[in-house]
């Protein structure tokens, strides 16, 4: 039978991780996502599923614990918020290059600097364009409901293992803190070491005599060898872009004007669309669910019919650059954003759409 | 006497441990790393723990440790080996996890990871090569560089007013409740090598028995970084390094 509960987004992440059969969580407290580790410590999954939960001495240490666990083929994760995710970038770059799977959650807050604990989407560039050093990408999932917070844990892990690359959930303080009804996923058993040996022959679980030693490393001193590593990564990212694009398109078929937004602000745009439709404006909403890979083809398809696009973000305008790259000047792409934790109302979004596009 | 007579098993007095690969080392002649690698390999073989051991290589000269010992390895970011070892040890409690780190890795950039892994009493072994210099990057000042000692980034000698004091990090780690065994050894003479091997074995036994963190510091030479011959480096180490970093157990509980 379905198990339905009223939960915060952060709590849903914790609950979903245990149910997924996650082997380890390593984190460091930071607002507005501390409930993830608090919930795990409260539930004590090490007594039930055997999941390890450890509070590290820093975000740097936490992501390197994830690196270690991932190298053993374990399903391991960490979570943080913007300043903490900046600290994790070194480790994320290593994990991406060593081609290891893991899940990273960023419940974004306003920056730059220590910023504010209020919601923001200003880490889009960091998440989508790489974040750390070197040519790498993450699979980036953007939930816009507490249900998706729960669902994307399994999706993030599954994609991470499918492509041997880190997945990141980027939510914001609104999604992390708000309470909604959640249909909880069923419990899956944690994989045994024998299952890991079968499914992840690269995992460092101790070397038996019947195989070569396994080494997880991101080091290749020879230029040609490092280029081969890069080419292998790029081929993988291309495959991800071809197969894993996810989005929600609402009322886009007849839309003259398309609002493009992800995460919490996409919900505000849905309300703006409903108000606008009542006024006779043919508005649609495109909500990218995967920010990487980005729904470029879908946006190009919409641009053939629509008169204009308004990208709405809780930032100075980051995703709008990718929308403009997709549209490539064929129709106007305008931007409306608020920063520092200010969340616009549906009326404000609609007013901006009228001002910038309908005129 | 023919060759076949000479290589009879009863005449065998020395053999390379099977844990070591047949690969030429990149270490400079005279460097302590090779001896410590060999000892770790011998102890792993003698204890019969090859299938359970997972090593964490550092950033520094020993970054390629994974090329020489035939076990599973993970290669860490600079200073982060104890964090990696922590997770592996927690997720695979039946395995035996060790880190192999230099002075810059363990006592400068990785200070937080080192102290907190030791303070949590992770059931891991930390092998610490202290040669008072950054070898791989070309001989810069380390946290353990002696007062007055010349390096590429203190070419006129370490000035404590400018650079602070040489860090006796093993003494600091011995103060932590999570460590069960902290010892300082060297590998420059045969007796010293024998003592080091015993220390390595005790450290692995502690990890298997889940007694907490064991730290084995090897006061080492970097003759190329120190710009000396291997022999001169050994003499210099005895005269200077051992004064600041005296050999012996700092803690054994």
Image (tube, rainbow, N blue to C red):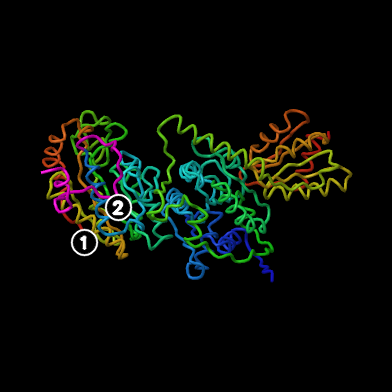
Task: Confirm whether the magenta stretch covers residue B28.
Answer: yes
Front residue of B135 and A174: B135
Front residue of A298 and A209: A209
Task: Confirm whether the magenta stretch covers residue B81.
Answer: no
Q: CA distance from mark 2 to mark 1?
A: 15 Å
* Label 2 Cα crowd, 10 Å radius (few <14 / some 14-19 / many 20+): many
Measured as percent of width and height from the top left, residue A300 is found at 75, 35
Residues under numbered marks 2 and 1 in contact, where contact means CB atoms less than 8 Å apart? no
Q: Residue at x 48, y 61 (%)?
A: A194
Secondary element type, mark 1: strand
Residue holding disc 2: B126
Q: Are marks 2 and 1 on the same chain?
A: yes
Measured as percent of width and height from the top left, residue B197 is found at 20, 53
Left or right side of A70 for A19? right
Magenta segment, prevailing SS (helix, strand or loop):
loop
Left or right side of A316 for B2? left
Q: Name the image quarter holding residue B235.
A: top left
Specify start and end residues of the magenta stretch as a single range: B1-30
- Vertical side of B126 occupied by A45: above or below: below
Residue holding disc 1: B252
């Amino acid at each position: 039978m379905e198990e339905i509960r009223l939960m915060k987004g952060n709590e849903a992440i914790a609950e979903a991780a245990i149910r997924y059969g996650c082997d380890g969580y390593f984190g460091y407290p930071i607002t507005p996502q501390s409930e993830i580790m608090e919930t795990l410590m409260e539930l004590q999954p090490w007594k039930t599923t055997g999941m390890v939960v450890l509070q590290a001495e820093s975000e740097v240490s936490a992501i390197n614990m994830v690196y270690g666990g991932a190298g053993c083929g374990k399903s391991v994760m960490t979570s943080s918020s913007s300043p903490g995710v900046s600290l994790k970038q070194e480790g994320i770059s290593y994990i991406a290059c060593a081609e290891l799977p893991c899940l990273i959650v960023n419940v974004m807050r306003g920056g730059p600097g220590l910023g504010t604990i209020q919601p923001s989407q200003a880490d889009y560039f960091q998440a989508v364009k790489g974040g750390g050093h070197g040519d790498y990408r993450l699979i980036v999932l953007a939930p816009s409901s507490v249900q998706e917070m729960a669902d994307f844990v399994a999706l993030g892990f599954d994609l991470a293992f499918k492509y041997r690359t880190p997945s990141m959930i980027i939510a914001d303080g609104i999604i992390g803190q708000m309470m909604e009804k959640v249909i909880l996923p069923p419990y899956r058993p944690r994989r045994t070491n024998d299952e890991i040996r079968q499914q992840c022959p690269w995992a460092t679980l101790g070397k038996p005599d019947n195989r070569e030693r396994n080494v997880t490393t991101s080091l290749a001193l020879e230029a040609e060898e490092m280029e081969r590593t890069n080419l292998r990564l790029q081929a993988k990212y291309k495959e991800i872009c071809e197969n894993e694009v996810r989005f929600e398109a609402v009322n886009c078929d007849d839309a003259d004007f398309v609002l493009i937004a992800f995460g919490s602000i996409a919900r505000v745009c849905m309300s703006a669309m409903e108000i606008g439709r009542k006024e006779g404006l043919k508005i649609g909403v495109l909500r990218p669910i995967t920010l990487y890979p980005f729904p470029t083809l879908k946006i190009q398809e919409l641009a053939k019919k629509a008169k204009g696009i308004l990208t709405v973000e809780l930032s100075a305008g980051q995703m709008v650059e990718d929308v403009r790259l997709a549209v490539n000047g064929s129709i106007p792409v305008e931007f409306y954003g608020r920063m520092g934790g200010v969340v616009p109302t549906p009326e404000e979004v609609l007013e901006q759409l009228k001002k910038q596009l309908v005129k | 006497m023919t060759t076949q007579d000479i290589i009879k098993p009863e005449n065998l007095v020395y053999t390379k441990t099977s844990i070591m690969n047949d690969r030429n080392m990149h270490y400079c002649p005279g460097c302590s790393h090779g001896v410590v690698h060999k000892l770790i390999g011998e102890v792993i073989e003698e204890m019969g723990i090859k299938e359970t051991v997972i090593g964490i290589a550092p950033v520094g000269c020993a970054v390629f440790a994974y090329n020489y010992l035939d076990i599973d390895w993970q290669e860490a970011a600079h200073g982060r080996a104890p964090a990696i070892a922590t997770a592996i040890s927690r997720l695979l409690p039946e395995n035996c996890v060790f880190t192999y780190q230099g002075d810059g890795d363990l006592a400068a950039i990785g200070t937080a990871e080192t102290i907190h892994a030791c303070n949590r009493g992770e059931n891991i072994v930390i092998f610490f090569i202290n040669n008072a210099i950054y070898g791989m990057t070309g001989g810069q000042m380390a946290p353990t560089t002696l007062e007055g000692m010349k390096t590429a980034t203190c070419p006129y000698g370490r000035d404590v007013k400018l650079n602070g004091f040489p860090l006796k990090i093993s003494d600091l780690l011995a103060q932590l409740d999570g460590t069960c065994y902290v010892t300082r050894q060297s590998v420059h003479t045969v007796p010293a090598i024998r003592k080091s091997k015993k220390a390595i074995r005790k450290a692995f036994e502690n990890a298997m028995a889940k007694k907490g963190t064991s730290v084995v510091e090897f006061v080492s030479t970097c003759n190329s970084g120190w710009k000396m011959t291997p022999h001169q480096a050994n003499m210099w180490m005895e005269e200077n390094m051992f004064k600041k970093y005296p050999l012996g157990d700092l803690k054994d509980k």
